[in-house]
Amino acid sequence: MSHWCRALFHSMSGRDNAFRNGIRNRDGKCVISGVVNELAPYFWASFEAAHIFPLEAEDLWIEWGYGRWVTNKDDANGVSKINSCQNGFLLEAGIHQLFDQYLVSVNPDDGYKVVMFTKNMYGIDGRMLEMVCRDPADPNRVSDELLRWHFRQSVLANMKGAGDPVFEHDFPPGTDMVKEINEGPYAKERFELEMAARLRGVY
């Protein structure tokens, strides 16, 4: 079954650069593994600024009003706030890929515990998210609501063995997938996940 893959390479716009630089300046380390970039600020290979809510789904971010979870930017017409530092953090490249695939997440309601949904090959399961990105005194701290959104999507994405179909190829041929999702439990959450799955190539 074909799916929409997340683009691996893209040109950097001014706002992308501002997001990346803001994340680097705030975090300085992979906030999930705790590995510090000792070569900063000159060399950032293998350390990446990761969006929590995917940039590719900015139209959905706007439609669902998720900018309300960003508090460090003033509301303005035409500004979605998706590139706020509150919608991101610094990750090692491999962990970034797992995060984008919903295979690792952070539960803000359990002491910011890191949760792996696959083999714990980085030894990060059960760690606490580094304080540098969630300091309550920092107006640029990561958004708890966005962490909660990602954690919920990760749980749903890894429930495939629990009964309900989650992805397109889990539905029998001829099924009206949108109708099934809308009439089922957690309709909005599952629709969000389906869209994110198409954008990120989760399967």
Image (cartoon, rainbow, N blue to C red):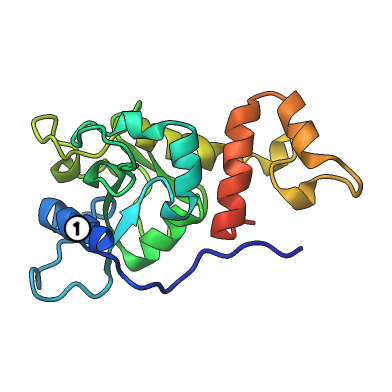
Task: Give the percent coordinates (x, y) of residue 143.
Answer: 28, 35
Residue that appears at 33% across and 56% down = 50
The N terminus is located in which quarter? Answer: bottom right
Above/below status of 42 relative to 25: below
Above/below status of 71 relative to 95: above
Q: Quadrant of residue 30?
A: bottom left
Tag 1 secondary structure: helix
Residue that appears at 37% across and 60% down = 95
Left or right of 45, for residue 50: right
In the rendered image, is residue 57 in sight?
Answer: yes
- All told, the count of numbered labels is 1
The C terminus is located in which quarter? Answer: bottom right
Q: Residues within 10 Å of mark 1 (few under 14, many from 20)?
A: some
Q: Nearer the viewer, residue 203 or 115?
A: 203
Q: As drawn, which residue projects farthest toward the front?
A: 77
Q: Quadrant of residue 126?
A: top left
Left or right of 181, for residue 202: left
Q: Nearer the viewer, residue 130 or 14?
A: 14
- Residue type, mark 1 in image: Ala
Task: Give the percent coordinates (x, y) of residue 64.
Answer: 48, 32
Task: Give the percent coordinates (x, y) of residue 33.
Answer: 27, 55
In the rendered image, is residue 107 in sight?
Answer: no
Residue that appears at 35% across and 73% down = 11
Above/below status of 30 relative to 69: below
Q: Nearer the viewer, residue 44 or 77?
A: 77
Task: Give the percent coordinates (x, y) of residue 127.
Answer: 29, 44
Left or right of 169, for residue 199: left
Q: Which residue matches tag 1?
A: 18
